[in-house]
Amino acid sequence: MIVALAGGVGAARFLEGLIRVIPQSEITVIGNVGDDIELHGLHISPDLDIVVYTLAGLVDPVKGWGFRGDTFQCQDMLHNFDHETWFNLGDRDLATHIYRTEQLRVGKRLSEVTRGVVRHLGVRIKLLPATDTPLQTYVLTTKGYMHFEEYMVKRQTAPKVLGVSFRGATSAKPTRNVIESIEKADGVIIAPSNPIVSIGAILAVPGIRSALQRTKARKVGVSPIIGGKTVKGPAAKLMRAVGFRATALGVAECYRDFLDTLIIDRVDRKLAPEIQDMGIRTIVTNTLMKRMSDKVRLAKIAVRETKR
């Protein structure tokens, strides 16, 4: 069993390759819920949905989120009612959020509801939210605290970031089977996701980081930073804001207490010796996932490293 820690778009693209290397039934994904937000009375789980939509072959390939070919008639009508519509929700996407919210209101756990979404969309991986208890990522900016989605989507990452916090983390409990999955894994892969607010939110759940430290499985990470930049999202900006270098070296520093191997891009090959000095084996290759063949090749390298 391979366990992957995953955020949204970057992780989902990596997982597209992974399911072509090993059977879906042998993959457990621990997903980020720090981005979860309530809008229009609906519980939205952006990263969990991106993973499922992508692996189901339904995601919008340009945006990397939402359904391919979705319409936005409901949102257009909300706009006519002078309702805030800064968070884009397509009509088919809304069906997922309505289903999730109804199921949560009758007492089901988020992990149970997520299992239903996965099954209904024909995906066979096991997708576990990091926690079933409320956890939200907030960004402290010069304009005050704001939910990560407001910072990311509404504010377009414009405000200067002073810090990041995970509200609810101290009382959060890992979802059932998360710790056991890590402890019994044949290998653990940290997908190319934002180390601060995607993987960081998962690691903020008490017990998950310590499980990664004690598992006998090899832990392999894929750097989302290439040449000091991120392909998508504000990872580099957030890393600098909280005191890490916005490089593959900074990624290694985020995970140095448990990581065995870090896969970095060729443009960062000069950083390999410093990463290896941390005791982290370093693999240098092309990590940019433009085509399916890139995703499969990268997944093969990561899986191979878990078997060392």
Image (spheres, grey):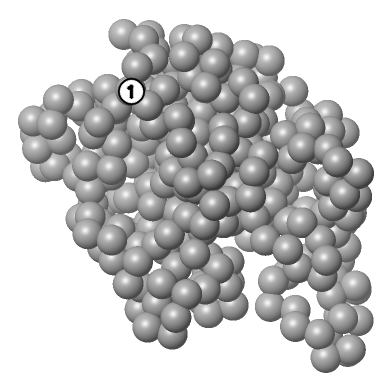
Residue under pointer 1: 213
Q: Please state the horizontal and vertical placement of residue 202, each as a whole percent of the image.
A: 49, 41
Depth check: 185 or 307 in front? Answer: 185
Taking the image as shown, residue 89 lies to the left or right of residue 105, namely left
Q: Quadrant of residue 239?
A: bottom left
**Where, quadrant-wise, is the N terminus in this rendering?**
top right
| Residue appearing at x 25%, y 31% in the figure | 257
User: As displayed, is residue 168 above or below residue 204?
Assistant: below
| Residue appearing at x 59%, y 77% in the figure | 154
**Where, quadrant-wise, is the C terminus in this rendering?**
top left
Q: Amino acid at mark 1?
A: Gln
Q: Please state the horizontal and vertical placement of residue 117, each as a whole percent of the image.
A: 81, 37
Q: Quadrant of residue 266?
A: top left
User: As displayed, is residue 36 above or below residue 82?
Assistant: above
Q: Is residue 61 at all visible to an observer of this figure?
A: no
Taking the image as shown, residue 72 lies to the left or right of residue 27, namely right
| Residue appearing at x 20%, y 27% in the figure | 280
Depth check: 229 or 198 in front? Answer: 198
Q: Please state the horizontal and vertical placement of residue 78, each as a whole percent of the image.
A: 87, 81
Q: Please state the horizontal and vertical placement of residue 209, each as a whole percent of the image.
A: 39, 31
